């Protein structure tokens, strides 16, 4: 997938606590009442299931699956499903809350959810992954639903798994229900523009931020950490708009060329090389950690969480960080980056292009009508640009960082909706 390993030394932070610290600061800035604060900080529903699966060798292995619905105040909950050996309830809880704020920041009528199965899909056959996906869907058939909870792909899952999920859910309902899941193959009601949507949102956010910082895209240098779906599309689209991508990285290491890397060539090489940049000759090889502290205008961490920590934040030289990944900056590193005057376009804003186009996919399924790729891109670009401008103005109004401003925008929207709907 092109994900980079997390930094060897990490700030010892539970991702849920990290998210809650930021939530707390934003809530205080907003003057949120205790009642609403307590409602918004607690997940609405947490489901844990055991999934006994027959493996190819005839043995039975039991996997643990999770689905956390953080909020359904704004509408049905929405969030991906990750298949990864590191999946645990705390991580899923943090990601579900992130989804609530992400949907609210870009003004989409969804609450937040997240799911996952503790497994290693790389060590499983396609048949084993299919049986696991179907068992998980069957176990969650009361939770999922186009008006209740709409899953999507995440780490370790893609269109194929979403197709199995849609089929299995449809069987439980006795009819085809395309709109229960997004990120499906095009022939099953997937949306044009979905594959590159998150990377495209990162590009739109980066350009909006560069405009505010008076950085000329045609003279800008960019380093992208992580060369999976998000990182590679963000790099390609920024390059198309004039920026020079001087460094990219994946699990195999970082690749640097001060004259600029030809991103399409790098993508073609990765695709022909089992999804890895290993052996790529258009650049010199650096240690993965070095990429983060290169002398560049824009840094795009698009790999895993907690890669920017108190151990390396002081050395970061970029003027702008655009977070393609979820939670790439630890809470403790925020203060260092802010003190150094670096603007951060936070994850809940910068990588919300994916959920925006997921929303479009759901709308198209509900309408039974397909949009052109051009319409999808035009509408998602406008949503991302408007969201950036709104967060930027709130940052100025409250005199806070872009990250806290994004949380303020999101929490304010969910809190107001909660009050209008009336709690218990």
Image (tube, helix red, strand yellow):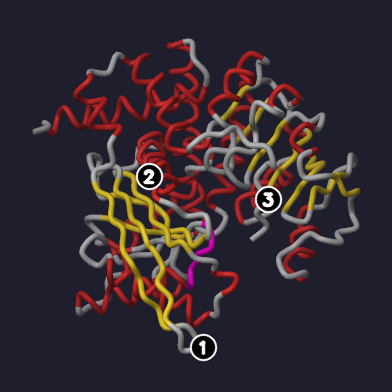
Q: Secondary structure at mark 3?
A: loop
310 horizontally vs 41: left or right: right
Of residues 312 and 153, which is closer to you in this image?
312
Q: Is residue 190 above or below residue 102?
A: below
Q: Is residue 333 magenta?
A: no
Tag 1 residue: 57
Q: Secondary structure at mark 2?
A: helix
Q: Is residue 325 above or below residue 218?
A: below
Q: Which residue corresponds to the image point at 74% horizontal and 60% vertical from the top-left? A: 267
Of residues 390 and 337, which is closer to you in this image?
337
Pinpoint residue 79: horizontal percent, then vertical percent: 38, 52
Q: Earlier in the sequence, mark 1 or mark 2?
A: 1
Q: Which residue corresponds to the image point at 39% horizontal and 61% vertical from the top-left? A: 182
Pinpoint residue 264: horizontal percent, then vertical percent: 76, 57
The residue range painted magenta reads 155-160
Q: Nearer the viewer, mark 1 or mark 2?
A: 1
Q: Which residue corresponds to the image point at 22% horizontal and 39% vertical from the top-left? A: 73
Q: CA distance from mark 1 to mark 2?
A: 34 Å
Tag 3 residue: 4
In the rendered image, the residue lying farthest to the left is 424
Tag 2 residue: 93
């Amino acid at each position: 997938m092109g994900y980079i390993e997390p930094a060897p030394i990490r700030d010892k932070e539970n991702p849920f606590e990290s998210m809650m610290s930021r939530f707390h600061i934003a809530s205080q800035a907003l003057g949120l009442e205790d009642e609403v604060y307590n409602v918004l900080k607690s997940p609405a529903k947490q489901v844990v299931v055991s999934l006994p699966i027959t493996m190819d060798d005839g043995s039975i292995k039991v996997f643990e699956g999770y689905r956390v619905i953080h909020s359904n105040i704004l509408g049905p909950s929405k969030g991906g499903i990750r298949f990864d050996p590191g999946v645990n309830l705390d991580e899923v809880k943090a990601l579900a809350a992130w989804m609530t704020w992400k949907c609210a920041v870009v003004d989409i009528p969804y609450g937040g959810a997240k799911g996952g199965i503790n497994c290693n899909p790389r060590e499983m056959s396609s048949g084993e992954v299919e049986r696991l996906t179907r068992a998980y869907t069957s176990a969650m058939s009361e939770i999922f639903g186009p008006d209740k909870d709409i899953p999507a792909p995440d780490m370790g899952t893609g269109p194929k798994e979403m197709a199995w999920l849609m089929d299995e859910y449809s069987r439980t309902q006795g009819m085809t229900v395309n709109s229960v899941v997004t990120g499906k193959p095009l022939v099953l009601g997937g949306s044009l523009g979905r594959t590159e949507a998150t990377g495209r949102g990162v590009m739109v956010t980066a350009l909006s931020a560069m405009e505010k910082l008076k950085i000329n895209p045609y003279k800008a240098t960019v380093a992208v950490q992580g060369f999976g779906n998000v990182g590679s599309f963000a790099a390609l689209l920024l390059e198309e708009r004039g920026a020079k991508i001087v460094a990219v990285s994946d699990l195999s290491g970082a690749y640097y060329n001060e004259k600029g890397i030809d991103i399409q060539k790098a993508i073609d090489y990765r695709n022909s090389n089992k999804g890895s940049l290993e052996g790529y000759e258009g650049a010199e090889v650096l240690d993965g950690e070095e990429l983060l502290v290169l002398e560049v205008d824009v840094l795009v961490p698009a790999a895993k969480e907690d890669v920017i920590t108190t151990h390396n934040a002081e050395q970061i030289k970029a003027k702008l960080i655009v977070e393609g990944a979820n939670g790439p900056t630890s809470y403790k590193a925020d203060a260092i980056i802010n003190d150094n005057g670096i603007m951060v376009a936070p994850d809940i804003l910068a990588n919300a292009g994916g959920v925006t186009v997921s929303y479009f996919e759901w709308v198209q399924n509900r309408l039974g009508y397909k949009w052109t790729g051009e319409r999808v891109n035009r509408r998602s670009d406008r949503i991302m640009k408007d969201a950036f401008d709104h967060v930027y103005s709130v940052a100025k109004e409250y005199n806070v960082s872009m990250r806290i401003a994004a949380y303020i925008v999101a929490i304010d929207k969910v809190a107001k909706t909660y009050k209008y709907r009336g709690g218990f």
